[in-house]
Amino acid sequence: MRCELCGEPADKLYEVEIEGARMRVCERCARNGKILREISEEKPMKTSEEELFSEKMIRSDYLQIISNAVKRMNLSADDISKAIGVEKQEIKQVLSGKIPPTDELAHKLEKFLNVKLFD
């Protein structure tokens, strides 16, 4: 497991809220926000080659696709946040290119913005 803030591997992660965004971070980075819970479960590793390549990858031009759709629909981060139930701060970070969307968020954006973000 890796810290979403510093990128370092960690045996134990914490779900924290930092400036309105929820993140999974290591113990050191958890000091920068409000700890919501400890994350102890780790997803099992994929075993077969078919399973390893079955997951879809987000497109490298996701930011341009999202930005174009947001402009076309004349939406704000607040509009998107309310419509899909995601923190406004996380939407702002994705729209500014500071962080990539999680798979879950990317699927919500695909549906709401009527775009294709996965290859």
Image (cartoon, rainbow, N blue to C red):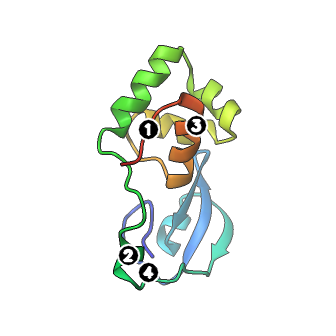
Question: Which of the marked residues, 2 or 1, is nearer the chain's N terminus?
Answer: 2
Viewer-side residue, 20 vs 108: 108
Q: Quadrant of residue 67?
A: top left
Tell me what residue is drawn at x 57 percent, y 28 percent.
77
Pointer 1 local density, CA inside 10 Å: few below 14, some 14–19, many at least 20:
some
Pointer 4 local density, CA inside 10 Å: few below 14, some 14–19, many at least 20:
few
Q: Amino acid at mark 4?
A: Lys
Which dot marks residue 14?
Answer: none
Q: Amino acid at mark 1?
A: Lys
Q: Quadrant of residue 68?
A: top left
Percent x, y of residue 65: 38, 31
Query: Looking at the image, is 89 positioned above or below residue 75?
Result: below
| Distance between mark 2 and mark 3 Cα atoms | 27 Å
Which dot marks residue 50?
Answer: 2
| Distance between mark 3 and mark 4 Cα atoms | 27 Å
Q: Which residue is mark 3?
A: 111
Q: Which residue is mark 4?
A: 46
Question: Which of the marked residues, 1 or 3, is nearer the chain's N terminus?
Answer: 3
Q: Which one is in front in this view, the residue at disc 2 or the one at disc 1?
A: 2
Question: Which of the marked residues, 3 or 4, is nearer the chain's N terminus?
Answer: 4
Q: Amino acid at mark 2?
A: Glu
